[in-house]
Amino acid sequence: MKRIIFDTSIYGKLLEDDFVRRKLENKLRNSDYIIYGNSIIRKELRNTPKHIILGNKKIRILLLTLYDSFVKKENHNLKINPLVERLSSDYFEEYKKLRGSFSKKELENDFIIVATAVIYSLDIIISNDERTMLSLVCLNVYKNVNKRYGLNEPIFKSYNSFKKELV
């Protein structure tokens, strides 16, 4: 069983791709995967504009329904606690030491999602964000900080590599 957290952008990809979504739902039914989330991801999904429509349904509602169907149990919606916040701050401090160019505001949610996965010992983070979360500098940040604290690092996968794994 693999414990996974999706970056916010993955939910939109899953809405677009029925085949992958059905494969994923199969894996969830068979208990091959457990999907986790946190309040940041749900909040970003809730911030989707209400007027955007897919077919005859509002995308915002579809995204939130998809999130709720994957992050089923209350204990799968992971809390952002002081340890997560501290680790996220340490990621940003390291990022600045490595001369990263994005602002704290631009990286804050990504770092909280990664810190959540690390603190709760999740196996995999799926993201499509190669500019920030999956950038080489950020991957080095996670590696350096996690090593400093003796924390296990999850596997980072892009949506496309995750999709290939499913089919």
Image (cartoon, rainbow, N blue to C red):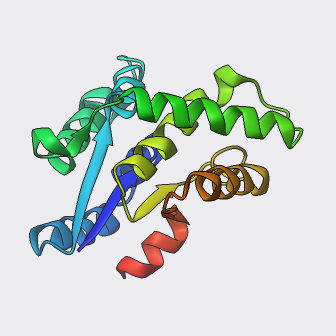
Can I make out residue 56 in this image?
Answer: no
Residue 43 point in image, percent of width and height: 36, 23
Q: Is residue 23 left or right of residue 7?
A: left
- Residue at the spot 10% in from the left edge and 44% down from the top edge: 73
Side (left or right) of 117 relative to 38: right
Quadrant of the image occupied by residue 40 = top left
Q: Position of residue 56 (x, y in %)?
A: 25, 33
Q: Is residue 52 left or right of residue 104?
A: left
Judge from the rendering whether residue 124 lies leftward or rightward of residue 108; answer left or right. left
- Residue at (11% x, 75% y) in the render: 30
In the displayed structure, 60 sits above or below 144; it is above
Q: Position of residue 152 (x, y in %)?
A: 48, 63
Q: Residue 38 appears at what percent x and percent y?
A: 32, 35
Is the residue 69 above or below the residue 49 in the image?
below
Considering every residue shown, the one lying at the far right of the view is 99
The residue depicted at 26 percent of the width and 55 percent of the height is 35
Q: Is residue 43 above or below residue 18?
A: above
Look at the image and tell me in which quarter the C terminus lies: bottom left
Question: Does the rendering let one see residue 129?
Answer: yes
